[in-house]
Image: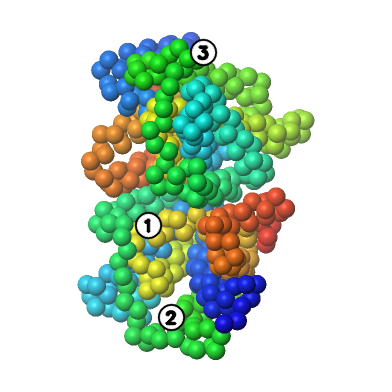
Amino acid sequence: MTEIFGVPTQALFGQLLIGLINGAFYAMLSLGLAVIFGLLNIINFTHGAQYMMGAFCAWFLLQYLGVGYWWALLIAPLAVGAIGVAIERTMLARLYKLDHLYGLLLTFGLALIIQGVFTNYFGSSGLPYQLPQEFAGAYNLSFMFLPKYRAWVIAVSLVVCLGTWYVIERTKLGSYLRAATENAALVQAFGINVPRMITLTYGFGVGLAAFAGVMAAPIYQVNPQMGANLIIVVFAVVVIGGMGSILGSIITGFGLGVIEGLTKVFYPEASNTVIFIIMAIVLLIKPSGLFGRAR
Amino acid sequence: MPDPTSPAARVPFGETERTTAIAFALMVALFAVAPVVVYPVFLMNVLCMALFACAFNLLIGFGGLLSFGHAMFLGMAGYVCAHAAKVWGLPPEAAIALGTAASALLGLVTGLLAIRSQGIYFAMITLALAQMVYFFCLQAPFTHGEDGIQSVPRGKLFAVLDLNNIWVLYYVVLAIFVGAFLLIYRTVHSPFGQVLKAIRENEPRAISLGYDADRYKLLAFVLSAALSGLAGATKAIVFQLASLTDVHWTMSGEVVLMTLLGGMGTIFGPVAGALVIVGLQNYLAPLGQWVTVITGAIFVVCVLAFRRGIVGELAAWWAKRRA
């Protein structure tokens, strides 16, 4: 067996792959957070819970209605996104005139409610989600085996992330969005319905979290707590990347996933903390984040 | 971040000095006689959490900084205190002092990292740093991971007061609480507290007047961390336990909730909030996970409709009645 730095290549590439998968989820979630933050100026603490709801939605669909993975990929983001729209309309919309921290506190409370309710009914042990038939098996890349579903996750998340980047940075709709981020009142004066745009943006960000949840369901087990710990890591990813840069949050997400994977190979004790340590270092050198603008 | 329209923000605490003195005397008297009718261990928990919330309030209510990672100070001090008392065999006063010092040091390090950012960034950074401390406590050998440090000896305070006597312990805890409470009150009313408030209201102006805003904020952060540590260390002696619960992010959320519910930026608010939340958790414990749901619901209601909190609303009602 070949080795690199005294580590078997199999293990190295295996952890690299896991890192890439984790990074795909970091990227999708931090992207949603960044989009929401850009326009609403709130940090959506419910993001982890909404990711978990997406996974549960897929599980419900399969368990009770026999609806499979592909439909879940479409239905779950729409359903959870709709709940997000309702939350934005009934609660968040009342807070825009106040300090932005109230938005954080509100979404934190909502996350506790959602996680509490799900834990009550489903316990804290995971529920398995059957891998769709199409993804059984793996590709042989000669130096390692790449399970088909893992390849799919990485590819799809890249497409989703770059698609979002394209819409925001390169289309008319995106230009409205960026303009409203800069100066909402002025954009509204030009006849664009900014409140509706805000609502839909929140819905989109939440839908993205639910989409990530469906993608995660076959890999990790469906568990009420699955979003709670992830979201804090994603916060650190957002701080490292810096808010306000779409491409930045994608690159940081994937990059940190890979770094975390490598840490598992070379120094497993630090694998839980490495992202936070990187955050501390970045804060020392560049407080506004790697891709962020100083504000 | 207290609502600038609330009277609690305009008048220092929404109370005049005389009413504050009366309220303070009333609070101490109530806590002094309460163990006759209420289970003392429950009350000591309230006192520790109230102190924790007061320390947190010093930062958010008067410095305008929302820390979402204050559990790291509570928990770390608990571990250090428990380790010092159990493994090193130090007397309780030294163990508590050591725990407090450890949290102050942790506050200095994390403060240096976090203080340069504001608002939401500050909240996220403190949360992430606290999560790092959580993982450290999960893995470090001296904390005993999931088991925590159990059966911590209470010992004799200054070699005289036997803390194994629940009554002695109770009044020692009450004395610690009252002392820290007065220290916070004094801090808020000192020139230092005034500068802190000025920075909260308008940081560029405070800087233009020649105040080094970052240094003031860092000092407030370290003080808040140290007092949170005092609460955590005392808690470890009272329950003879230091565990992961106290470093977990849910604890950071709880202290935010206590302060929010009681009234941010009011001097008595955190105490009222701690009493309500600890009471809820104690009496609703049989409901299991529903407690989390209720906690979340209180959060939502507070943010949407009750932003001044219990004490803030009371002060507003009082001010209106007198006007």
Figure check: B236 above or below A49:
above
Give the chain letter at badge 3.
Answer: B
Is residue B283 visible in this depiction of the protein?
yes
Percent x, y of residue B111? 63, 40
Q: Which mark is residue A149?
A: 2
- For marks 3 and 1, give the one nearer the viewer: 1
Front residue of A253/A70: it is A253
Give the chain letter at badge 2.
Answer: A
| CA–CA distance in space, label 3 to label 2 | 67 Å
Percent x, y of residue A215? 42, 73
Figure check: A281 above or below A196:
above
Percent x, y of residue A49? 39, 58
Instruction: Specify the amino acid type for callout 1.
Output: Gln
Q: Quadrant of residue B198?
A: top right
Residue indicated by mark 1: A225
Q: Residue at x 76, y 34 (%)?
A: B208
Residue indicated by mark 3: B17
Disc on the earlier residue, 1 or 2: 2
Percent x, y of residue B244? 43, 43
Instruction: Specify the amino acid type for callout 2.
Output: Tyr
Q: Residues within 10 Å of mark 3 (few under 14, many from 20)?
A: few
| CA–CA distance in space, label 1 to label 2 | 23 Å
Q: Residue at x 52, y 65 (%)?
A: A26
Dot 1: what SS? loop
Instruction: Specify the amino acid type for callout 3.
Output: Glu
Q: Residue at x 27, y 21 (%)?
A: B38
Badges 1 and 2, same chain: yes
